[in-house]
Amino acid sequence: MNMRALLVAFTLTFAAPVGLAQAQPAPSAATHDHGVPVQRIVSPGGIEAWLVSNATVPMIVLSAYWRGGSAIEPGNLTGVTNVMADMLTEGAGELDTNAFKERLQDLNMGLDFGASWDGVGMSLTTLTENRDAAAEMARLALMQPRFDDAPLARIKGQLMVGIRQRETNQGYIANLALDRALYPDHPYASRVSAASVQAIDRAALQERRSALLTRAGLKITIVGDIDAETAGRMIDRIFGQLPQGAPRPEPPDVHLHPPTPLIIRPLPQPQSLILFAAPGIGYDDPDWIPLAVANYIIGGGGFSSRLMDQVRERRGLVYGIGTGPSVRDHSALIIGSAQTENQHVAEAIAVTRAEIGRFYRDGATQTEVNDAITYLTGSFALDLDSDVKIAGVVGGYQAVGRPIDYINRRNDLIRAVTLAEVNRVIRRLYNPDAFTFVVVGQPPVDARGELVVTQAPAIPHGDDPAAH
């Protein structure tokens, strides 16, 4: 499983919480309408996990997530958590980098680690017949990483190249500008620097590993050809030697600065990247599911969304435009993006703001809500058509604190959303004046640095997109 995809799954809920010696399933088991049973098990060593047993394919997928990531690393060592995660598969025990990777290849297994702002993730995939050997490789990576000088120098060198290249990367520049406009003093607005990379050494990696990779805050999901008893033994084999640890320190919650209507970051490119964002809500907010429906209507539904219809299809101002909730442990935004030719930036922003304003003023229609519900519930099966995908969804729900039966109730919760609930969340979150817009490129500007409109946009007014 791709580690980046795994960490994304841990942040999305739409695509997109022994004593038994034999690790028998506890009564809290759930089966959703796609036939995936989710069990809570506890290993003989006392480690809890969620298990989906499925013997259809002789494969096992295990994902693990530790709460605590880049947002709580020392300020002079920004980036150390990501480097530590990368280094876990660069040699362990008696196996140096080459030997470790050759062993993974011989076992036809995957083992990846990655870090996000809020956590560290692990993904293991193995054939059933290689289960024990694969578990031993994961144990070695967690308990006996070598952190050798040569692979560390290589990874730090790659980071230094990335630092140089990011100065011309539109996505990096736009996201940094947005973060620093909305929460400039929060760790989420920090970025790795040449100085912080140079300061990362073996001792720093060991400290991060010891601080983060403990039983405290550990969430484990196992999917595939394995029963509860065997899964319990596998869990103890991999994670049983981890120290108990203590709850991680938490960064403060984000307190968003007032919106900035427009931020322009000049970059000599023929096209401009536009980002726009406003305050959002977290997964535990009662309006979260109505927000999923509202987002689909305004910008999450591809070519069926209002923004795609108004800004791209009708006016040809952008190549594409979309929106979605962006949730971290201590922040929540509604964020959107679009790519366009420089000369169309002013018009594209004007039409986008106007359409969001009309959405805020008039709300959605019953037809739009019905269509969104049909898509969000019907497409869910595509997120569950392989063990790898199931592990991502179940692990994601577990990581963000959903109850074990959420996968069973998710579609029913969406079907229960009403037009009134959707319009309530629209009025709560889609005030066009709450959005900050960032442009990276070379749009036409006047002497005051303000965008120049090269063609008067046809602003949407009262026409109903649902009627087209």
Image (cartoon, grey):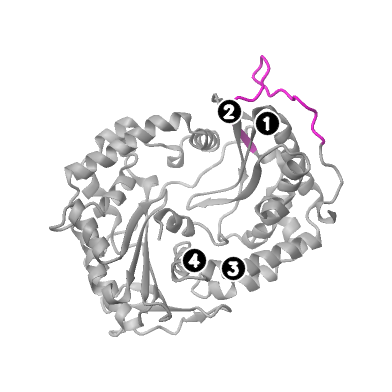
Question: Does the magenta segment cover residue 447?
Answer: yes
> Tag 3: residue type?
Phe
Give the numbered dot on residue 393: 4
Separation of marks 4 and 3 at Cα, in angstroms: 10 Å
State which tag comes first along the sequence, 4 or 1.
1
Q: Is mark 4 in CB contact (under 8 Å) with mark 1?
A: no
- Closest to the observer, 274 or 309: 309
Q: Residues within 10 Å of mark 4 (few under 14, many from 20)?
A: many
Identify the magenta region.
436-458
* 4 or 2: mark nearer the eye: 2
**Residue farthest along the top direction in this orientation:** 447
Give the numbered dot on residue 441: 2
Q: Position of residue 218 (x, y in %)?
A: 35, 64
Q: Position of residue 79 (x, y in %)?
A: 34, 41
Separation of marks 4 and 1 at Cα, in angstroms: 37 Å
Q: Is residue 205 above or below residue 181?
A: below
Asked whether the viewer can see residue 17, the reply is no
